[in-house]
Image: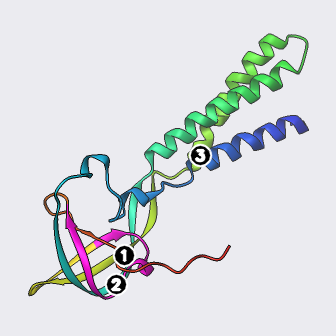
């Protein structure tokens, strides 16, 4: 493998890695809403958080895996076509062969992208009137503290315990 081919292979794999590493599960957090939930009446209650425990949530990563496969195939095909075109006397045939080979290699690169990813969450135990409940929320433990919190119900059996504190600012 010559140096140009190695560089192109590195670009293909870097592109795939950036495109499909992990799902961003922020969309599942209690304080994130879908457009259809805006400007609508939602039942709200106050509760008392009595326990905050770390948890993990398995999130489907199929969309990112598909993106990585498709992006890898396209970038691989383009890179293979460029390498093929610049080698040998039959540049058109080499470009087609290089494009096909690069597409196969690029699509195989998505094999390293997991079907599910684990994201940080919290298991919140809270008291509502005289009953005790537990609800798992995507988020960080530093977003919650024991004591008074607001629970929003957007549909049956869905609890969105709103963060009742903020995390310390990250130093850059």
Q: Which residues make up the magenta segment?
A: 136-153
For label 1, count other residues whose C-alpha is less than 10 Å away and answer few (under 14), some (14-19) or many (20+): many
The furthest residue to the front: 39
Residues under numbered marks 1 and 2 in contact, where contact means CB atoms less than 8 Å apart:
yes
Q: Nearer the viewer, residue 95 or 34?
A: 34
Asked which secondary structure carries label 2, the reply is strand
User: On the image, numbered disc 2 is attached to which residue?
Assistant: 52
Spot occupied by residue 170 in the image (x, y as percentages of width and height): 60, 76
Above or below: residue 163 compared with residue 130: above
Rendered-image quadrant of the N terminus? top right
On whether residue 103 falls in the magenta region, the answer is no
Q: Earlier in the sequence, mark 2 or mark 3?
A: 3
Quadrant of residue 52 within the rendered picture: bottom left
Asked which secondary structure carries label 1, the reply is strand
Residues under numbered marks 2 and 3 in contact, where contact means CB atoms less than 8 Å apart:
no
User: On the image, numbered disc 3 is attached to which residue?
Assistant: 19
As drawn, the label of residue 122 is: 1
Q: Distance between the Cα atoms at labels 2 and 3?
A: 33 Å
For label 3, count other residues whose C-alpha is less than 10 Å away and answer few (under 14), some (14-19) or many (20+): many
Rendered-image quadrant of the C terminus? bottom right
Above or below: residue 69 compared with residue 95: below
Q: Nearer the viewer, residue 165 or 62?
A: 165
Q: Residue at x 71, y 23 (%)?
A: 99
Q: Residue at x 78, y 12 (%)?
A: 93
Residues under numbered marks 1 and 3 in contact, where contact means CB atoms less than 8 Å apart:
no
Apparent side of residue 42 relative to residue 61 in the rendered image (left or right): left
Q: Distance between the Cα atoms at labels 1 and 3?
A: 27 Å
Above or below: residue 47 compared with residue 43: below
Spot occupied by residue 122 in the image (x, y as percentages of width and height): 36, 75
Q: Earlier in the sequence, mark 1 or mark 3?
A: 3
Q: Earlier in the sequence, mark 1 or mark 2?
A: 2
Q: Residue at x 35, y 74 (%)?
A: 163
């Amino acid at each position: 493998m010559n140096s140009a081919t190695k560089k192109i292979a590195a670009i293909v794999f870097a592109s795939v890695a950036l495109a499909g590493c992990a799902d961003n599960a922020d969309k599942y957090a209690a304080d994130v809403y879908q457009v259809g939930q805006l400007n609508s009446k939602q039942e709200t209650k106050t509760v008392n958080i009595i326990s905050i425990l770390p948890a993990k949530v398995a999130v489907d990563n199929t969309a990112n895996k598909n993106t990585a496969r498709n992006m890898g195939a396209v970038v691989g095909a383009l890179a293979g076509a460029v390498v093929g075109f610049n080698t040998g006397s039959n540049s058109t045939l080499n470009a087609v062969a290089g494009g096909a080979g690069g597409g196969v290699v690029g699509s195989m690169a998505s094999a390293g992208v997991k079907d599910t990813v684990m994201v940080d969450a919290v298991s919140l135990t809270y008291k509502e009137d005289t009953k005790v409940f537990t609800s798992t929320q995507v988020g960080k433990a530093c977003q919650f503290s024991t004591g008074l919190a607001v629970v929003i119900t957007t549909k049956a059996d869905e609890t969105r315990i709103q963060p009742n504190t903020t995390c310390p600012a990250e130093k850059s």
